């Protein structure tokens, strides 16, 4: 039965399912994640061009920020996408996604006006149509994939299974429904569109295919310029070496077609240049202020295998897909080299970004853009076998990966999997679990230092083994015991002494203000009873951090609920502070024993890292 399903039938079923699921969780769901959170996270920045320019005529985004702050009920809201360049502001994200969502934004505007709901870019019909826009481009990307597989002579049954797997067994499913304004679905669509049109263009370099190829390449660059690496696949999508030479010859000879291609690419890219001029008066700039690549130290192993976000850990289907390289090696050395070079280059670029795990999110989301390419490799692998044997066999073998992805999607959306601080211990603790005991059960905090931080040398180190008084430390309750980790004195926390000894240091003593700082903390912990420290929080705070606003952050001390009793164990945490601009503000770091069950701490130390001025962009 499975081998008889056509790709068209599979796409129709998937379309119906996605729309029904979208309506269920987004429109007819009164709680989270509901329709009010369709435009969310980094997606607010990608989308912000539309309300700012078309409704507010405000290229500085100040009105949009005010509106978002009201929606989020956060008067101190400062979006990460709005960065200062001189005395003006620029949206650090590129405008490709906004261009693609323009028709859906206009539909939202029309229906909001028609029904009398707020025409503000964020009311019901705006959110609804933007969500539909994500599904539209997701399905169009899958349709392009279907056509690519057909042109590459992949059997229909294999194409059907491949399409199902690349959606249901990867985080493409999550980003299409739960975070539809992130850029990855749109890049998936644009890259698949470019690959399909180039296949046609490589056979006959007509004005039509030149335009479409240029259009999709321009959109790729306008969404995420680093995805220009896709051009390394040009040899892969030509029939052979002779066809590749023929294509380049036609590119040079058919000047009108080539001019159309180049003009289309440049015209689309010029949209971003125009927006930069509109926002800042500059036609060329680096919008990711004080962010960048670390090309000398790419985190290749982490992006592929880390329990924090590793591609092969959270999306093992892609590891299976990479096996298609073996098939490619024996089929065509030219195609193999092209694909291998692309995969190395794209992984290297992704792994070189300063925040290699790309912030909060489910899985290593930066790879989603290329899932159409990996799907081709997977199809090559399955296509080796007769459909009646290969398709059912691979369906059975890979069905657990669909189950794993859907289960982990549920875990992520129900606070079982953390958005940015997972590790091996946490992953193993929640693996395949859905019971109530694992919901919101993980603690710890492991942020990376910002790109501008000098991580080689701490600016300040504050250490306390509690054996003697230390400057800048609050004593609180320190006692002598026979089982201290070092020496004889420890910090003792119970129901009467909930707050540990901790640091209390003036901001001006830490370093030059205003600035953000990176803090690494270490301490030893021992429970008196099982789980005594499960209720303990690491607390960092500063009153009047910028002269008015107070800052407070707390997170669980333990990564996972503890079972060890009367045994010392190490804890580590790390995070970036907000910008501190009040030199008289007092930074406090301590442990709060909310559970009130007795526990001991020892050898508490903090390393504080400051900015490397060489990395700052004025």
Image (cartoon, grey):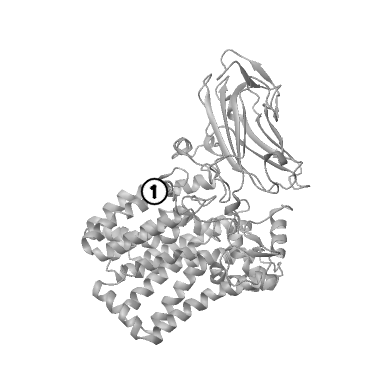
Quadrant assignment, res 83:
bottom right
Q: Position of residue 142 (x, y in %)?
A: 41, 65
Q: What residue is shown at x 53% (from left), y 34% (from top)?
A: 559
54 over 32 or under it: above or below: below
Q: Name the quadrant of the N terminus.
A: bottom left
Q: Which residue is mark 1?
A: 312
Left or right side of 210 for 61: right
The answer to which of 280 and 593 lies nearer the viewer is 280
Q: What residue is shown at x 36% (from left), y 52% (from top)?
A: 317
Q: Position of residue 296 (x, y in %)?
A: 44, 52
77 over 10 or under it: above or below: above
Q: Name the quadrant of the C terminus.
A: bottom right
Left or right side of 554 for 308: left
Q: What residue is shown at x 36% (from left), y 84% (from top)?
A: 206
The answer to which of 38 and 184 lies nearer the viewer is 184
Tag 1, which secondary structure?
Answer: helix
Can you see residue 78? yes
Q: Position of residue 238 (x, y in %)?
A: 29, 72
The answer to which of 476 and 35 lies nearer the viewer is 476
């Amino acid at each position: 039965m499975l081998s008889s399903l056509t790709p068209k039938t599979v796409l129709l079923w998937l379309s119906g399912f996605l729309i029904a699921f979208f309506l269920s969780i987004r429109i007819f769901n009164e709680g989270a994640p509901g329709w009010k959170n369709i435009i969310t996270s980094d997606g607010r920045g990608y989308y912000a061009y539309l309300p700012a320019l078309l409704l507010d005529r405000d290229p500085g985004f100040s009105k949009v920020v005010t509106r978002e702050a009201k929606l989020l009920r956060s008067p101190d809201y400062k979006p990460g996408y709005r960065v200062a360049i001189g005395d003006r502001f620029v949206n650090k994200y590129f405008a490709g996604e906004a261009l693609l969502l323009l028709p859906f934004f206009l539909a939202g505007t029309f229906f909001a006006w028609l029904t009398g709901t707020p025409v503000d870019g964020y009311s019901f019909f705006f959110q609804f149509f933007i969500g539909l826009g994500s599904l539209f481009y997701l399905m169009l990307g899958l349709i392009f994939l279907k056509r690519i597989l057909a042109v590459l002579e992949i059997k229909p049954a294999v194409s059907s299974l491949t399409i199902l797997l690349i959606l249901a067994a990867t985080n493409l499913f999550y980003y299409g429904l739960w975070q539809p304004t992130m850029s990855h679905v749109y890049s998936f669509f644009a890259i698949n569109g470019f690959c399909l049109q180039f296949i046609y263009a490589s056979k006959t370099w007509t004005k039509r295919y030149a335009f479409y190829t240029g259009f999709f390449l321009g959109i790729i660059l306008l969404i995420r310029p680093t995805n220009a690496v896709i051009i390394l696949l040009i040899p892969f999508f030509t029939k052979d070496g002779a066809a590749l030479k023929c294509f380049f010859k036609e590119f040079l000879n058919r000047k009108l077609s080539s001019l159309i291609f180049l003009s289309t690419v440049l015209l689309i890219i010029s949209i971003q240049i125009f927006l930069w001029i509109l926002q800042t008066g500059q036609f060329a700039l680096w919008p990711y202020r004080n962010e960048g690549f670390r090309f000398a130290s790419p985190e290749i192993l982490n992006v592929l295998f880390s329990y924090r976000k590793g591609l092969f850990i959270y999306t093992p289907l892609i590891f299976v897909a990479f096996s298609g390289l073996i098939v490619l090696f024996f089929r065509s050395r030219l195609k193999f080299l092209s694909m291998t070079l692309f995969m190395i280059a794209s992984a290297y670029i992704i792994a070189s970004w300063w925040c290699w795990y790309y912030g909060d999110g489910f899985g290593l989301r930066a790879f989603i853009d290329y899932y159409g390419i990996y799907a081709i490799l997977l199809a090559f692998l399955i296509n080796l076998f007769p459909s009646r044997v290969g398709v059912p066999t691979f369906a059975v073998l890979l069905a657990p990966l669909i189950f794993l992805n859907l289960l982990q999607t549920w875990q992520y959306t129900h606070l079982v999997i953390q958005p940015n601080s997972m590790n091996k211990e946490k992953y193993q603790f929640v693996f395949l679990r859905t019971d109530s005991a694992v919901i919101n059960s993980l603690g710890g905090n492991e942020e990376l230092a910002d790109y501008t931080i000098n991580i080689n040398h701490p600016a300040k180190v504050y250490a306390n083994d509690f054996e003697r008084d230390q400057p800048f430390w609050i004593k609180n309750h320190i006692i002598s015991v026979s089982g201290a980790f070092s020496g004889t004195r420890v910090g003792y926390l119970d129901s009467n002494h909930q707050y540990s000894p901790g640091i209390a240091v003036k901001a001006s003593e830490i370093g030059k203000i205003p600035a953000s700082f990176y803090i690494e903390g270490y301490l030893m912990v021992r429970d008196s009873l099982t789980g005594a420290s499960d209720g303990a929080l690491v607390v960092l705070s500063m009153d009047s951090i910028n002269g008015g606003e107070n800052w407070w952050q707390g997170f669980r001390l333990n990564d996972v609920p503890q079972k060890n009793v009367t045994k010392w164990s190490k804890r580590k945490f790390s995070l970036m502070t907000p910008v501190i601009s009040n030199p008289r503000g007092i930074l406090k770091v301590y442990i709060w024993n909310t559970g009130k069950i007795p526990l001991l701490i020892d050898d508490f130390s903090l390393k504080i890292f400051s900015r490397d001025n060489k990395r700052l962009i004025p």
